[in-house]
Amino acid sequence: MAINTLEMAKIFQQSLDKQMGIEATSGWMESNAQNVKYNGGDTVRMPRISTTGMAKYDRDNGFNQGSVTLTYDDYKLTQDRGRTFQLDSMDVDESNFIASAGTVMGEFQRLQVVPEVDAYRYSRIAALAKNAHRTTDGFTPSETNILAQLDKEITDLQDAIGEAEQLVILMATPIRTVLNNVKNIERRLDVTQFKAGEINTRVKTYNEIPIFSVPSLRMKTAYVFADGKTTGQEAGGFKADTGAKSINWIIISRRAPIAISKTDKVRIFTPDVNQKADAWKLDYRKFHDIWIPTNKLAGVWANLGA
């Protein structure tokens, strides 16, 4: 029986979106986009609510009338990325196509897409923090100075947004090792459940603040994202830009970042349809981006290396 490529593409697309949320260290940020409207393509609509402030209550006339405004602003998903792959028909027949294609697309996303999306998000957060003067620059963590600096930045954030706002620490893995080696640090570390949407994971906490360990390759202030055409970029992917700084850690309000990641297009062509080769053809296209509303920038602090 002929394979239904349209239905299979939908299944792959749903599976790949779920994988992003689980494997990306920044996947939890997508749970903040619940009210964002996305209908395909490179544009999302984000709600903006504004109200008037408090006024004096009048015992004779009662409440002063206030107003509330709900509007939707359009935002462009600036990261438009994609690849196409071919599986030779001699290696893959219809009976094992599903398993083979699922393995290829899953590995491609795990090894290439997830790290790139993480890297873009953290570099973008660092840039927004820099523009808002919410960074520590040129800090080299050691076992003797890391706790004092971490505590200072946490205190400054909580002083700005209040202690009721839940924070998250995103820390480069080598810096996490420095933290773990601090004498008697066990007294300040614990384990908790971190739930984002349908995903529930166990993470370590520092003074009750969840810590996510991030590979240092993904924690730079700037990247070059290959276009696949420029000389030397044919292999695709990304790399740290010349002069990029390392990000030691980011402390951020859990509600601040709004991330979107959509596997907008997964197309499957059978060997009979593929005009270029006797092979199955898989097209993959990903739109993604991240924003931090201006009124939530006070809940962000980035610690940058030398």
Image: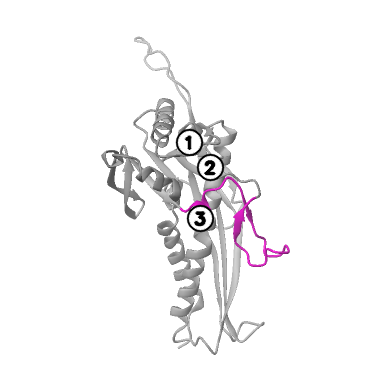
Q: Amino acid at mark 2?
A: Ile
Callout 3 crowding tier (Cα within 10 Å): few <14, some 14–19, many ≥20: many
Residue 295 on image: x %, y %? 50, 32
Residue at the far right in the pictured view: 231
How would you classify the magenta stretch by its main secondary structure? loop
Q: Secondary structure at mark 2?
A: helix
Disc 1 vs disc 3: Cβ atoms closer than 8 Å?
A: no
User: Which label is found at residue 261?
Assistant: 3
User: Which label is found at residue 212?
Assistant: none
Q: Nearer the viewer, residue 192 or 146?
A: 146
Residue 52 on image: x %, y %? 48, 23
Q: Residue at x 53, y 52 (%)?
A: 119
User: Which label is found at residue 125?
Assistant: 2
Q: Residue at x 56, y 40 (%)?
A: 306
Disc 1 vs disc 2: Cβ atoms closer than 8 Å?
A: yes
The answer to which of marks 1 and 2 sits earlier in the sequence is 2
Disc 1 to disc 2, how far (Cα)? 8 Å
Q: Amino acid at mark 3?
A: Ser
Residue 93 on image: x %, y %? 49, 88
Q: Quadrant of the N terminus?
A: bottom left
Q: Secondary structure at mark 3?
A: strand
Callout 2 crowding tier (Cα within 10 Å): few <14, some 14–19, many ≥20: many
Q: Which residues are magenta?
A: 215-241
Residue position for label 1: 300
Residue 240 on image: x %, y %? 60, 52
Q: Secondary structure at mark 1?
A: strand
Q: Residue 222 magenta-drawn? A: yes
